[in-house]
């Protein structure tokens, strides 16, 4: 395991694929949700709100894991394990709009919950693959 994304799997992070984001709940069970994301070559960013359970999970325990699976080959995947590094306020929903466009909605508008929007920034510490 390393923190380097294998070159043959970089496309899974560059393509607009949904990732499965795991966080640790208050009762120490794992919560996994499909998420839009953006990878900048070092960190992963997600749009979220400060009013949901996933946000509270990460405030209590910053551990997180992202699994991205190739839709054409379910046995080809990359898993990024790490921790919440930063929470950036996004009260206009600009990052949500950017991700919406990345995922194919050219007319994406800010969501109604924009005042509560944040960008969750994940530091990648371990990469596993298949």
Image (tube, rainbow, N blue to C red):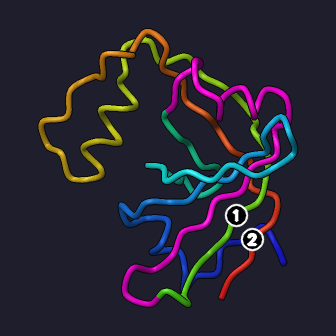
Q: Label 2 neighbourhood size at 10 Å, few (<14), some (14-19), many (20+)? A: some
Q: Do callouts 1 and 2 mark residues in contact (Cβ within 8 Å)?
A: yes
User: Which residue appears at 71% of the width and 57% of the height?
Assistant: 65
Q: Between residue 29 and residue 121, name the one nearer to us.
A: 29
- Seen in the picture, residue 74 relative to 41 is either above or below; the reply is below
Spatial CA span between label 1 and label 2: 5 Å
- Quadrant location of the C terminus in the rendered image: bottom right
Q: Label 1 neighbourhood size at 10 Å, few (<14), some (14-19), many (20+)? A: many
User: Which residue appears at 79% of the width and 45% of the height?
Assistant: 24
- Name the spot of residue 57 as percent of width and height, x first: 75, 33
User: Which residue appears at 68% of the width and 49% of the height?
Assistant: 31
Q: Which residues are magenta?
A: 48-73
Q: Secondary structure at mark 1?
A: strand
Q: Is residue 26 magenta?
A: no
Res 80 label:
1
Q: Is residue 63 magenta?
A: yes
- Name the spot of residue 94 as percent of width and height, x first: 35, 24
User: Which residue appears at 44% of the width and 90% of the height?
Assistant: 73
- Seen in the picture, residue 58 relative to 7 is either above or below; the reply is above
- Quadrant location of the N terminus in the rendered image: bottom right
- Name the spot of residue 115 as percent of width and height, x first: 43, 9
- Give the left or right position of residue 58, taking residue 73 as reference: right
- Name the spot of residue 70 as percent of width and height, x first: 45, 80
Find disc 2 in the rendering and name its residue. 127
């Amino acid at each position: 395991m390393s923190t380097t994304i294998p070159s043959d799997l970089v496309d899974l992070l560059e393509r607009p694929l949904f990732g499965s984001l795991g966080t640790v709940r208050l009762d120490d069970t794992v919560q996994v949700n499909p998420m839009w994301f953006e990878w900048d070559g070092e960190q992963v960013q997600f749009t979220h709100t400060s009013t949901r359970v996933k946000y509270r999970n990460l405030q209590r325990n910053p551990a997180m894991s992202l699994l991205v699976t190739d839709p054409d080959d379910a046995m080809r995947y990359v898993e990024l394990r790490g921790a919440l590094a930063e929470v950036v306020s996004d009260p206009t929903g600009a990052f949500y709009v950017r991700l919406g466009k990345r995922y194919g909605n050219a007319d994406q508008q800010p969501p109604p919950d924009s005042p509560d929007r944040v960008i969750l920034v994940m530091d990648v510490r371990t990469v596993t693959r298949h």
